[in-house]
Amino acid sequence: MAKTVLVTGGCGFIGTNFIRLILKSRPDWRVVNLDRLTYAGNLENLKDVADHPRYRFIRGDICDRDLVTGLFADHRIDTVVHFAAESHVDRSITGPDEFIRTNISGTFTLLDVARQQWLENGA
């Protein structure tokens, strides 16, 4: 069954391996990779799939409600795999604000947009 999967944090270690797996093993799936490219993400990790016809990279933030809403509408997202996160514990002690913004507020934004879009569009 054809799917369009939104992968958040797709330029990190786990995300890049997941995207390669999907593109290799699911020929009817399209992948939209949303990544802010912070310290943990590197676009070079996916240079081997950058021109793949079923892959699209979007540089952006999961906290940006308008961007996320637009991605759901424009790409008809029906599946989300959420890897985007601030994850270095040492940094969370010295700068917790960014962790709260991304890990809590960003996740809420992503879930809320998905809920709204899927209710409106019957996905």
Image: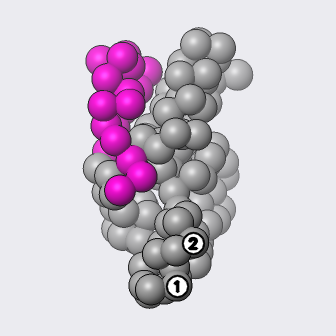
Residue 115 visible in rendering: yes
- Give the residue at x 36% y 63%: 61
- Residue 71 place in picture, x, y as percent: 40, 51
Disc 1, SS = helix
Residue 113 visible in rendering: no
3D distance between C-alphas at marks 2 and 1? 7 Å
The number of discs equals 2
- Give the residue at x 42% y 52%: 40
- In the drawing, does residue 72 fall left or right of residue 39? right
- Depth check: give the residue in front, 114 or 64: 64
Whether pointer 2 and pointer 1 mark residues with C-beta atoms closer than 8 Å, the reply is yes
* Chief SS of the magenta region: loop
Q: Which residue is mark 2?
A: 89
Q: Amino acid at mark 1?
A: Ile
- Which quarter of the rendered picture does the N terminus lie within? top right
- Residue 122 place in picture, x, y as percent: 66, 52
- In the drawing, does residue 56 fall left or right of residue 72? left
Residue 93 disc label: 1
- Residue 77 place in picture, x, y as percent: 53, 44
- Which region is colored magenta? 39-58
